[in-house]
Image (cartoon, helix red, strand yellow):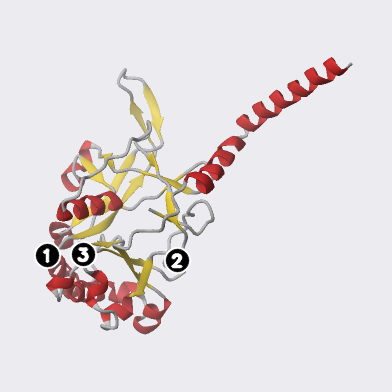
Amino acid sequence: MKKHLYKLGYAIVIALIFILVALDSLYSIDMFLTDHIYSRLDGPSSKIVIIGVDEETLSKYGNFALWSREKLAGLLNKLYEDEANSPSVVGLDFILSDHYNEASDLALAEAAKGRDVVIGTNIVYRGAVEKDENGKKYFNKSHIFNVEMPYEELDKVTDKGFTNAYIAADGYVRYSRNSILIPEELRDKAGRTHESFSYRIYEKYQEKNGGRIMVPEVNKEGQFQFLYSGESGEFSVVSFDAVLSGKVPGAAFRDAIVLVGAYAPGLQGSSTKAPEKSWIGS
């Protein structure tokens, strides 16, 4: 009798494993363990400083679209006014693809000229029927329909990188990619390969400081999984308005990677960081 019960128990365990695999539950468990055991929670780099367009900034200047180019130009000039305290690279995490106001558009392009500035682009995906190497038709849901680049004057004087987030099966941001192959019809404006925003910033920082550029191994989708180094709030964050008003000393940005982006709730993206929905990637 005992022997039969053991066999029944084994059968139930095996059946449960198959069910978990079918429901993709083991993936979530595996990722949970990865987040909490293997992540190197040694804190983020002190060489990364975030300048946030926060509620304080919006309450002072109003609608972001109305002043973004003019104030971003002022911010760049402020960051580089003291050469001894200038940053290594500045990343503007915004998609500024259209002309808005001629004077402010040109002011921003002029402020970025000759400086190590990387600006965001956006890869637009739209499914399309394509042919594989054997001539067989298939539906490619990841077909690149367009690349939203900066307006012409800004495009000419900055480095670019796509800001698209890659969401894992459990709904969290766990993957990234260094670059993406661009279709022939879009290469005149975006190049044959288009690097990610984060990787282009990393490359420029390493090049400027004589560091070695490490290229992670990728999966069949061209993506690599990254670990987290700290929790939300551990990076140095200062208000956009505080920097522009001269309330933050220039030494805070000396040789740093300065990331400028939306920090107010109404402007932020909706992607979720793993594993606590508030962590910031390394």
User: Mark 1 sits on what residue?
Assistant: 113
Callout 3 amino acid: Asp
The residues bearing labels 2 and 1 have C-alpha atoms spaced at a distance of 32 Å
Callout 1 amino acid: Lys
Residue 235 visible: yes
As drawn, is 175 to the left or to the right of 4?
Answer: left
**Which residue corresponds to the image point at 53% horizontal and 48% vertical from the top-left?**
36
Which element carries disc 1, helix, strand or loop? Answer: loop
* Marked residue nearer the N-terminal end (2 or 1): 1
The residues bearing labels 1 and 3 have C-alpha atoms spaced at a distance of 18 Å
As drawn, is 273 to the left or to the right of 94?
Answer: right
Position of the N terminus, as image quadrant, is top right
Query: What label sits on residue 101 in the rendered view?
Result: none
User: Mark 3 sits on what residue?
Assistant: 255
**Which residue corresponds to the image point at 21% horizontal and 55% vertical from the top-left?**
205
Of tags 1 and 3, the one toward the viewer is 3
- In the picture shown, does residue 22 fall above or below 134? below
* Marked residue nearer the N-terminal end (2 or 3): 2
The residues bearing labels 2 and 3 have C-alpha atoms spaced at a distance of 21 Å
Which image quadrant is residue 177 in? top left
Callout 2 amino acid: Gly
Residue closest to the far left: 114
**Which residue corresponds to the image point at 52% horizontal and 56% vertical from the top-left?**
277
The image position of residue 35, as x and y in percent, is 51, 47
The image position of residue 147, as x and y in percent, is 27, 49
Residue 171 visible: no
